[in-house]
Amino acid sequence: MSVHVNHIAREVALAGTWSGTPLDSITLEYDERFRRRIVLNCDGGTQVLLDLPEVRVLRDGDALVTDAGAMILVRATPERLLEVRCRDRQHLLRIAWHLGNRHLPTEIAGDTLRIRADHVIAEMLRTLGAELVAVDAPFNPEGGAYGHDWSHGHDH
């Protein structure tokens, strides 16, 4: 079965490195922004085949560059997150270690951390003395070690 699309995007322009008016936009949650090849139905009705050489995370503000040179703006859907606030830098580092030890995607947002809402992790963080605030915001966790944006394991 083949799908006819009018646009093919084979590269991504990173947020802050491109300008101009995009042809359209695509709004996706974090898990939906981990892509290599997929047909995307954009917010304004444009259909584009994303055909990247390798899997990557699309970040809020990035643009998919079509073969014709048009830009499709990537928008991150606000998600239910927990903002983790700590007493001081040492406490922040300790909390970050515990989140990393559990391989949880974590966003560093100034002097706070953001994770997806999870009642089990929330209880652990409260036990460790963190203050938690529920927020709805785009989720852009740190890229993983060894040059990967996100992973589930220890593939080196």
Image (spheres, rainbow, N blue to C red):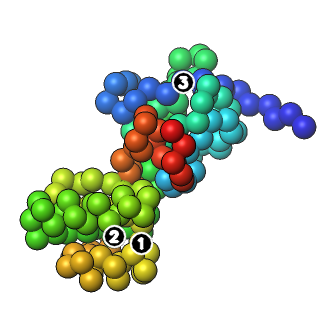
- Could you say whether the residue bearing mark 2 is in a helix, strand or loop? strand
Q: Is residue 87 left or right of residue 140?
A: left
Label 1 crowd bin: few (<14), some (14–19), many (20+), radius 10 Å:
some
Residue type indicated by callout 3? Glu
Residue type indicated by callout 2? Leu
**Where does residue 92 sit, x and y in percent of width and height?**
18, 63
Report the residue at 74% width, 31% height from top.
5
- Could you say whether the residue bearing mark 3 is in a helix, strand or loop? strand
On screen, 36 above or below 141? above
- Could you say whether the residue bearing mark 1 is in a helix, strand or loop? loop
Quick check: marks 1 and 2 in contact, CB under 8 Å?
A: yes
Marks 1 and 2, how far apart in space?
5 Å
Nearer the camera: disc 3 or disc 1: 1
Q: Which residue lies furthest to the top in this view?
A: 68
Q: In which quarter of the image is the N terminus?
A: top right
Nearer the camera: disc 3 or disc 2: 2
Which residue is label 2 attached to?
Answer: 82
Label 2 crowd bin: few (<14), some (14–19), many (20+), radius 10 Å:
many
Residue 46 disc label: none
Residue 143 appearing in the image: yes
Which residue is label 3 attached to?
Answer: 11
Of callouts 3 and 2, which one flags the residue occurring earlier in the amino acid sequence?
3
Of callouts 1 and 2, which one flags the residue occurring earlier in the amino acid sequence?
2
Q: In this view, does 140 lie to the left or right of 34?
A: left
Report the residue at 25% width, 66% height from top.
95
Which residue is label 1 attached to?
Answer: 117
